[in-house]
Image: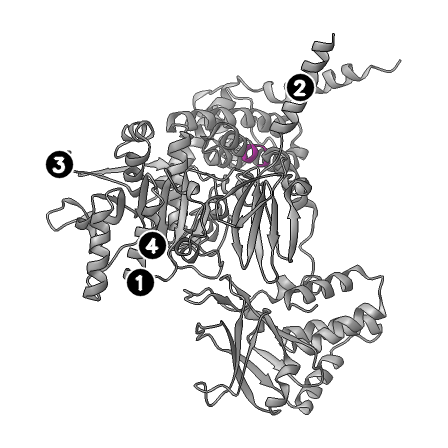
Amino acid sequence: MKKPLHKHIGHHARKVHGHITKYLYERDTIFATIWVFIFIVVLGSIPLNLGVLNPIKLGLKDFDFNDMSYSKLGKASTTPIDSNIVIINIGQADREGIALLIDKAASYKPKAMGLDVVFDGPRDPHKDSLLEETIKRNENLVMAAKYGVDSADKLVAGGNYFLHKGNHVGYVNFPNDDKETVRTYYPFKKDDHDKNIVLPSFSSSLLKLFDTSAYQKLEKKANQKVIINYTRRTSQYLVVNAEDLLMDNVDSASIEGRIALLAYVNTNPNDIEDKKFSPMNEKFAGKSHPDMNGIVVHANIISMALEKNYIKKVPLWATLLIAVFVCWLHMSFFVRYYLESHIWFHLVAKILQVASAIFFVWLGIYLFDRYRLKVDLKLSMITIVMAVDVIYFYEAWAVWMHKKFNYKTVFKPHHH
Amino acid sequence: MKKLQFLILFCTAAIAVSAQNQFLLYSFKGNVSVIENNVESKAKVGKPLNAAATVKVAAGGAVTLICNEAAMFTFTKAGSYQLGKFGDSCKVNSSSVSANYVKYVWASMTKSNGSAGSNRKAYMNTVGAVTRNMTNIWIDNRLDTINYSGVVNEFPISWKSYAEAKDFEFSLYKDDNISTPIYTTFVNKLKVPIKDFSAKMKAGNSYFWTAAVKGEENDELKVLNYVTKEKFEAVLETIKKQGAAFEATAEQSYRIAFLLEDAHYLAEAYQYYLKATTSDPQNGLYRSTLMSFKKDYEIK
């Protein structure tokens, strides 16, 4: 008589369960798991930087699986336009032109304005004085600066000739190399020695003027590196060209009471002027071009703060705990095949490694997309890869221990 | 009972009204106006519009709208567009990231990358570099350099504009004098057919060309080599000889087209892509490659 389907499924489920759990609580499984982590620690502690010879390590230096969700999986492609923010493209306007644009934007009565331009030094005195007067006149204008340390190792904002002419300042530089993806930023920078010296970022200064509650929430993250939640590309913000603004081709309601960001924007993919690498880059691995204008990165930070959708990062201890658990389960499964079906061991191990990699990448992307939870599952995947090799070492070690100290083990001498 | 029916009808109508698509005028160029409540007004960036509004686009104009804050679409042809009729454009792909992940992994594992011959873009995507550009004109690096033999006259030189401009200036220079153009024309399209200025060139010479928004300058010069017929024949002969022993006409034409395009004989390559498609109209690869070639080089 044929078995019903549910009994078939139940039978196979019990079989798989048996494969995983048969050796789960064996001393060998637990010790082999420990050995995996000892190997990781030892290999990671070698003082030589072998990464220089490893193209995979070099290639994956700036890699994050979650980036795939933007470029390949359609994440953030349907995020509604953020109506709180309007970007005014200053194009190639000179200082006089920028002054004109600031005054014109101000006439639309935005609640806050940000000028993401750093001016090197004095140029044409006439144009400089025009811009200076405009900056002084507009009290809700946030000027861009760059944070750094002076000769006395004191935190300072600089890099902008007109910095002290304005009422508000925010730094626009990010805590990473220009060639790396901008993933994090500091909402505030505190001096290492004098805690009273605190500089706000460009976005924090704008939020202070625009939304007090969002700013207060951000204030609690002072001197912390915050992960930027990218939710929008350039086209998901209203971008107004300078000509349209000057010719009154803009609906006043779209700027009034909102944040107006004045900066250089260009959607030409071959124009990399003021562009950064973002996780939204079409190419998520390997060499690519910077894809996002700096102002759009700032706009994403402001959107994140206004919508209060910060990314939560799983702490290191939890990442380690997950890795131990994952490694333990896989080790139990591998030990079972190693001892009982050795002929199939390598084939099954490789299939499981691929399947686990696909599953854990999905899990990481799912948690990031659904719960804005960033879990680093790279360590878990490394343990799965290493587990197979460690079994061979462990077998030799266990047999040696058995001979020497009568250590009880399921591994027999010359097992294969 | 009647009251209940009325209430249901009222609620249904209210839901239908509230579910109407909302549009946002994202950007426009040229003469664009909006008709709302029978009142016509000038289009303004950032203006919210309801489904009852009509957008009027004059010749040479274009307007980009965002529906329900998410779906972007553009009208580029002159005419009046009643927004209520464009509900289909408001649809956005709502499949989950997880579903897309499964599709992506499956496609990556099962689809091959294809050979070079079946993927001309991947094979020829080795040109040029990014620029810190000051101009509003972008010229595809595939159009630098163009080798032109004069055997085929029907081929356009094209570019893209990041500015909302109506008129463009095309200039042709001799390679030993880049200060004075030997030919200049103003066009309102983003291309110029080679036949318009081929009489100004002499076989065996090299030329530079550029395009700029009218009133602006573009220092980026691209090369146009007017190759002699003899030289082209020699190139063609070499390519022909490289074929397999039993090569069908369509196969040979496709191979020649592919290699000519790679050698930047674009006008000539087009003729061979056409020949391959007409010789074997059932071949999907030939058809799709021809379509893709026409799209890339703005051949209408």
Q: Which residue is mark 4?
A: A101
Residue A286 visible in this rendered orientation of the protein: yes
> Residue A315: percent from the left, percent from the top?
38, 27
Closer to us: mark 3 or mark 4?
A: 4
Closer to us: mark 4 or mark 1?
A: 4
**Foreground of the two, A195 or B243:** A195
Closer to us: mark 3 or mark 2?
A: 2
Q: Amino acid at mark 2?
A: Phe
The image's mark for residue B37 is none
Q: Earlier in the sequence, mark 3 or mark 4?
A: 4
For the residues bearing labels 2 and 1, Cβ distance under 8 angstroms: no
Q: Chain of mark 1?
A: A
Q: Chain of mark 3?
A: A
Disc 2 and disc 1 on one polypeptide chain? no
The outermost residue toward the right is A1
Q: Chain of mark 4?
A: A
Q: Amino acid at mark 1?
A: Asp
**In whole angstroms, how far apart are the C-alphas of marks 3 and 1?**
38 Å
Q: Which residue is mark 1?
A: A94
Task: Specify start and end residues of the magenta stretch as a single range.
Answer: A358-362
Q: Residues within 10 Å of mark 3 (few under 14, many from 20)?
A: few
Residue A304 sits in quarter: top left
The image's mark for residue A194 is 3
